Image: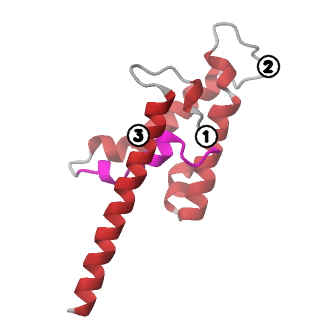
Amino acid sequence: TILFNMLRSGSEVQEAVLRWISKILRLNSERRKMHFDPVKVSSLGFFVNMGAVMLTNAMPFIVSKKDRVKSVNPRFLLGSEGDRINYALCTRFHATPSEMEGLGKELLEKEAEAERKKATKTAAAFVA
């Protein structure tokens, strides 16, 4: 699909596509209410089509025999960019806002530690 090719065409285009998807979700947050104004949100057909596109794009992860979970950026899901998804408005089971924030910081620390280890290994291999 066009969206799949855009996601694979480079980090700048990928970031723009992900921002666009998060903007769609943010602008349609009214839809989660029991009674919403249909003029202010996208149609049901749009979301059915978007779900089909997203499922099609997820197929390489679903049917792959390789472990591709490592290639998923968990920071995107937590909204650490600030302009993506606001999880404070979402329903969560067993997680307070402070716990969500702590989880985000923990993931960032683990990622930074992994980067430090990788840099140390690279430097050691370069010296040797």
Disc assigned to residue 103: 3
Query: For residue 42, which quarter of the picture?
Result: top right
Which mark is nearer the camera, 3 or 2? 3
The first of marks 2 and 1 along the sequence is 1
| Identity of the residue drawn at 61% across and 42% down | 84
**2 relative to 31, above or below:** below
| Identity of the residue drawn at 65% across and 25% down | 29
Amino acid type at image mark 2:
Val
Which mark is nearer the camera, 1 or 3? 3
2 and 1 marks in contact (CB < 8 Å): no
| Identity of the residue drawn at 48% across and 32% down | 98
Q: Which quadrant is the C terminus positioned in? A: bottom left
| Identity of the residue drawn at 46% across and 47% down | 75
3 and 2 marks in contact (CB < 8 Å): no
The spot of residue 103 in percent (x, y) is 41, 40
The residue stretch that appears in magenta = 67-83
The first of marks 1 and 3 along the sequence is 1
**Dot 1 lies on which element?**
helix
Query: For residue 123, which quarter of the picture?
Result: bottom left
Disc assigned to residue 22: 1
**63 relative to 122, above or below:** above
The spot of residue 112 in percent (x, y) is 39, 61
Residue bearing mark 2: 39
